[in-house]
Amino acid sequence: MKIAAVYGGAAYGPQVKLARNATVLVATPGRLEDLIERKAVSLQDVNLAVIDEADRMADMGFLPSVKKIMRMAKSDRQTLLFSATLDGDIKSLVNEFQHDPVRHEVEVPDDGGDVVHRFYIVDRNDRMKALTRLSSTHDKLIVFCRTKHGSDRVAKNLDAAGVSTCVIHGNRTQAQREKALQQFKKGSATVMVATDVAARGIHIDDVPLVVHYDLPEDVKDYIHRSGRTGRAGRDGEVVSLLDGSARKSTIRLLKGSDIEVTFKDFPFEDDESIADAIGAIGTVPTRSLVDQRQMS
């Protein structure tokens, strides 16, 4: 079978050629709509449709596009749907596009390491100083920022401090993202600065530290971001750099997540390794680790 992947951020010409000759087409909703409008793709003969990461697409507002696409395929096709949840908007997909569906629920074996979560209080003006300190005590780390411009700014400041850095966010082309990922995997960049676009789907075995430079707005995003460490049986560490006014919002964000939230001042004066100087503040229990991988 000829298999093609089409997605935004890549040139149309090669993807049009790939899509026209494909037996199996793996696509993001937006790019697939574009190719349909350009008459490069027809779904009239599709007999198997797979909706993957349905919950994530719902969170990102893509369900109207997904429904529009699904309505173009054969009515007697088979539809497979994969999702971490099956309620709300996801239930509407099941009701409209699946007939007498069989539900399968998979429990993932616990092969993850322990993940320690640390919550440091640090003045906003000192966050970059704290991040540089963390970069000097860890061989590899991923830093998550809330915005694309914020990611660029943090990366620029780290580069100025002599830290080899790469960046992944929505304004980067697919080629730039792939290059950044390879730099990080091979070690030519020791810090990856990213938005939530890198919070899912990226698997790198040996990331010892994830830093929330900006906390996300949703607990699921916190779990997905944090899931970039503690993979494949290795232990991991997650650090959140928080302004003093963020205590209540942090507790509210993680309420019900089984993550213990205890605040400490960032140990600028400590000469020892940060990970050794401060004891374990909160470890994700086994059940949370399983849930984390299911969502990832």
Image (cartoon, rainbow, N blue to C red):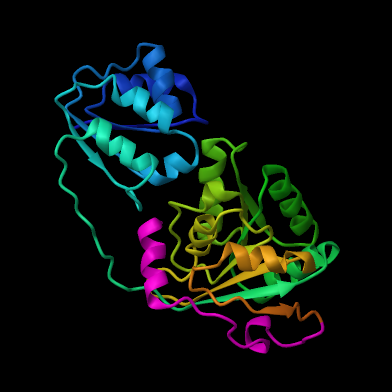
Percent position (x, y) of residue 234?
Answer: 43, 75
- The one nearer the camera, 143 or 3, is 143
- The one nearer the camera, 272 or 63, is 63
* Magenta-colored span: 269-296
**Where, by quadrant of the figure, is residue 130 drawn?**
bottom right
In this view, 286 is above or below 75: below
**Where, by quadrant of the figure, is residue 142 drawn?**
bottom right
Percent position (x, y) of residue 118?
Answer: 62, 76
The verdict on residue 294 being magenta is yes
- Residue at 69% x, 67% y: name it: 248
- Residue at 36% x, 23% y: name it: 68
In this view, 124 is above or below 72: below
- Residue at 24% x, 31% y: name it: 97
Q: Quadrant of the N terminus?
A: top left
Percent position (x, y) of residue 261?
Answer: 61, 75
Percent position (x, y) of residue 194?
Answer: 61, 51
Q: Is residue 130 something one can see in this rendering?
A: yes
- The one nearer the camera, 262 or 43, is 262
Q: Quadrant of the C terminus?
A: bottom left
Most extreme residue toward the right is 125
